[in-house]
Amino acid sequence: MTEDADDPGRLDVRAAAIIRAGLDRVLVSDAFRAAPQLSAFLSFVVERTIEGRAAELKGYTIAVEGLGRPADFNPQLDPIVRVEAGRLRRALAQYYAGDGRGDPVQISMPVGGYVPVFTWFGSEGSRIPEDAAYDAPEPDRRTARRWAGLTLAALALGLLTLCWWYLRPLREPPPSVAVKPAATEQAAGMRPEASAASLLVRVAITTPNPPSDPALAAVLRRFSALLVDAMARFDDLVTIKTPLPGATLEDDVDYAIEIDAQGLDSGAVGLARLRSVKDGRIVWTTSSSRSSLAALQESDLAEMARRLATRLTEPFGIIPADARQFASSPAIRCILKAFDARRAMLPELHQAARFCLADLVEQDPGFYPAWAHLAIMTLGKHGAAATSQGDSPQGDTDPVRTPLDRSLAAALTAIRLAPSGARAYQALMKVLLLRGATEEAIQMGREAQTRNPYDPEIMADVGALYVRLDRPLEGLPLLERAISLSVARPPRYDFYAFLGAYLVGAGKASDSHAGMLAADTSEFGLLGQALKAATDNDREKRAQAIAQLVEKSALFRQDPRAFLQRRAFSASVIDKVLTALELNKP
């Protein structure tokens, strides 16, 4: 039976659950693991069709919203969508001819359009040959659709059978938190943005006292719009609201950014304060002045808005810092716990954050930030030495899939839920790098930066990627920029900046970053201290730092080279580091 996606109506909950589960099976297959752009394409068109928005699936929409191309994309000049659609059709045909032969639902995309078609099968044994399904002539497809429309009772029976097929594992312990049939069904019909709006930190940007001067009021409106755009990029942390001037803030707002501007001679003074709506606390204030309003350019306003947005909203900025103490949403506390775990790099914090995120995606499987952060946190299990199955509770281990596979599934789920989410692409970048797909990882890093060019965390991760690949001249500018924007940054920013400067022989710069690592006892902090001591020919300090690192990391104790390899350092960087530490065994 075939469900025609040209129907503009939204699919029912059960059908959507089955299709999403089938999509997940496709995305974690070998054919799609190394093809993130195909995965993003397929996820986007399937989700739009499930939501009843198939009419929007045109070349421009797919390129801009699904593949992250800029708003000035011209489908007549750039054939990327047509090319990727052809690749997607071939990849789907290959999948259903092999690993997906027994899947109870088949996803295809007929030539001549971008709207997917879903073909249902009541059991594994009823699958038709793949070549017949894929190459069927158009009259046969129309006949199949007419037959489907005349046999609704059979379709309903088939759906019940399929639901039983997918949901039957619920009677058994779930093998992994990465893909859960129960969670998939709960997510059906849930819009990701609606979920996020109630779970993230909710911030209203207001102008309590609009200026009477029309020119100054226009500048303030433009600045507010730029600020909204910049802050909204941090969509795994905040939800931005813009109430009308003078409107009373509703109960569903956590913080208000109140912006004011006053004329001063030919210039102006801008004021901003962050207020906690629930208890009235003034959390933070700032001001800025300009001597000439006429000389104020659009680029000046954009830079001011970007700096304010980053200062307030970046993962270690002012709003997240206050939310760590006062947030009422368990979901945002869980997200912040993940950031803190990456900052401290302590195994127990990583484990606590991972379990918290696993519970979160089970409770709300439509919440994209949790999937993105779960993908990142699960990578910690790949980088650590092998541990016994008994040290993790049920749900954290998977007897079939490796941590890298689970991270990949979670990252792809995040992208499926939020194709515009920068954190999802950051997560996929990190997964692909550890899987050895270097060029694809670089591309995903660029996609993450395109979606949020203001996030120091993304800048630092992309910069660290280049340093690990022994391309420090490309990574150092990003790391320096991230460091300048994040006052309360994690020590790993300075570690990678130090390593990058060390690799290019910039002694003064490396000394500056090494100083920030002097008191850090994380694995990277100790590695940086050992390298700095080696540079200074201080054998005693080098030995002390290495001894501490050996005590902290079982994998480094067993095999220093494997320790670095599991963190995706290139062979050339590993050789340079181990030679400096006199640990480079033949």
Image: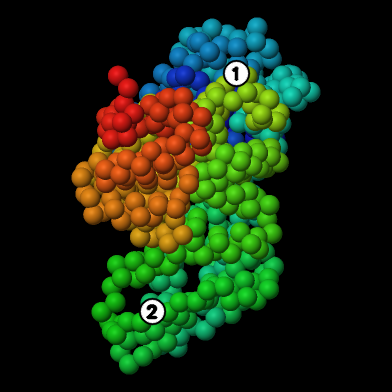
* Quadrant housing residue 562: top left
- Residue closest to the eye, 418 or 385: 385
Location of mark 2 (residue): 288
Is tag 2's residue or tag 1's residue first in the polypeptide sequence? 2
Q: Is residue 519 left or right of residue 578?
A: right
Amino acid type at circle 2 is Ser
Q: Is residue 207 above or below residue 48?
A: below
Q: Residue at x 50, y 35 (%)?
A: 551
Place of residue 277 in the rendered image (x, y in percent of width and height, measured from the top left): 64, 72
Q: Is residue 156 visible?
A: no
Mark 1: few/some/many CA within 10 Å (<14, 14-19, 20+): few
Q: Which mark is residue 168?
A: none
Mark 2: few/some/many CA within 10 Å (<14, 14-19, 20+): few
Badge 2 marks a residue whose secondary structure is strand
Q: Are marks 2 and 1 in contact (CB under 8 Å)?
A: no
Q: Is residue 353 left or right of residue 314?
A: right
* Quadrant housing residue 283: bottom right
Q: Is residue 132 left or right of residue 456?
A: right
Location of mark 1 (residue): 400
Gap between marks 2 and 1, in whole Å? 57 Å
Place of residue 178 in the rendered image (x, y in percent of width and height, measured from the top left): 61, 31
Q: Identify the residue at the far left of this view.
A: 505
Q: Is residue 562 visible?
A: yes
Q: Residue at x 59, y 25 (%)?
A: 387
Count of numbered badges drawn on the protein: 2
Q: Residue at x 51, y 37 (%)?
A: 552
Q: Is residue 552 above or below residue 529?
A: above
Place of residue 105 in the rendered image (x, y in percent of width and height, measured from the top left): 61, 20
Amino acid type at circle 1 is Val
- Residue closest to the eye, 408 or 489: 489
Q: Is residue 323 above or below residue 136?
A: below
Q: The N terminus lies in which quarter of the figure?
A: top right
